[in-house]
Amino acid sequence: MKHKEARMVSVNGPAGRLMATVEGDGGIPAIFVHDIAGDRSHWAETQAGLATRSVAFDLRGLGESSGSHGPFGVEAAVEDVVAVADALSPEKFVLVGHGFGAAVAGAFAAYYPERLAGLLYVEAPGDLRRMPKPEAEAWLDNFSAAKYGAFHEHWLTPQLLAAKDSTRVLVMKTMRTSRREAIAGNLESLLAHDPDAAFEQFKGPTHALVAATGPETLVGQRADLSRTVAPHASHWLMLDSAKWFHTEVVRFLGQSRHHP
């Protein structure tokens, strides 16, 4: 397949302009959805290594996208995916989501299963509705305007312990430039998200790439979800283990090619 260099594209989203990077050509298209305090730059190395056409974009209110006033949450982010897919990938595509983006990908699969050739979860959270209400409320309180300033520099530290230095630098950079309102709104909606709906509606190729397999993760809660565990990687698999991640994405794209 021929390779097209990366180009930046602006898409009209429901809450304003959505900025996307499109790269490659041919094959099954892939759309990448970033995590809660990230942006499309987290997928740059993945996109550069793919022969197939790929699209990574900034969710509303994050990165270079507009929509700083929201609304935010899983449902709102699904609307962003719809806008990007309508504009840049009207045919069937593989949807790849990381962290919060994985929850968004699952919700999209539940609403629009006919649009997908495959669903690839990356470090997907489990059903957070199981979290005790006092614990959930205390966690969300850290993202209030009053507490976020002192809290935000430390909240990703546990997840970054196993990260490469370059990963840590990029993740902290995108976290510091991410709007608190977007992070808080997306997190709050995640606590009410039902991850099982995707499995009920989408019956095509589904797989998970993970570093963690604990009881709070989607793979920890669903034994029926096939998964591949990354060697020596943090939550940001695509940054820590770029070559491994590329191989796994290419393998999954090949499997998804046969989905009608």
Image: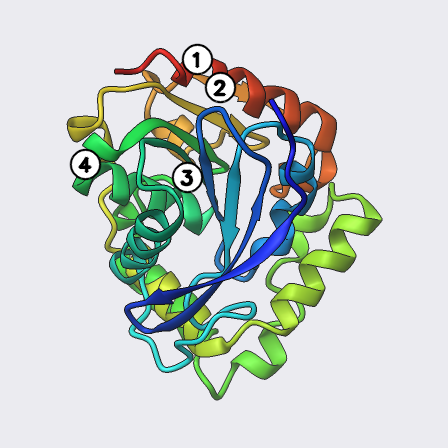
First in sequence: mark 1 or mark 3? 3
Q: In the image, what residue occupies the spot 55% across and 70% down?
A: 64
- Residue named by callout 4: 197
SS label for mark 4: helix
Distance (Cα) linking label 4 and label 3 = 17 Å
- Circles 3 and 2, Cβ within 8 Å, touching? The answer is no
Q: Tell me the quadrant of the picture where the C terminus can be found.
A: top left
Residue 216: mark in rendering: 3
- Where is residue 182, by image quadrant? bottom left
Q: Look at label 1 and name its amino acid.
A: Gln
Residue 252: mark in rendering: 2
First in sequence: mark 4 or mark 3? 4
- Where is residue 190, by image quadrant? bottom left
- Circles 1 and 2, Cβ within 8 Å, touching? The answer is yes
Query: What x and y, as percent, mark residue 5?
Result: 67, 44
Distance (Cα) linking label 1 and label 2 = 5 Å
- Circles 1 and 3, Cβ within 8 Å, touching? The answer is no
SS label for mark 1: helix
Instruction: Please rate how many residues cluster around mark 3, counting C-alpha atoms within 10 Å: few if below 14, some from 14 to 19, many from 20.
Output: some
SS label for mark 3: loop
Instruction: Please rate how many residues cluster around mark 2, counting C-alpha atoms within 10 Å: few if below 14, some from 14 to 19, many from 20.
Output: some
The nearer-to-camera label among 4 and 1 is: 1
- Residue named by callout 1: 255
**Residue 232 can be seen in this image:** no
SS label for mark 2: helix
Say left or right for 108 vs 32: left
Count of all numbered marks drawn on residues in the image: 4
Q: Look at label 2 and name its amino acid.
A: Phe
Q: In the image, what residue occupies the spot 69% across and 50% down?
A: 160
Query: What x and y, as percent, mark residue 179?
Result: 51, 76
Residue 255, compared with residue 98, is above or below; it is above
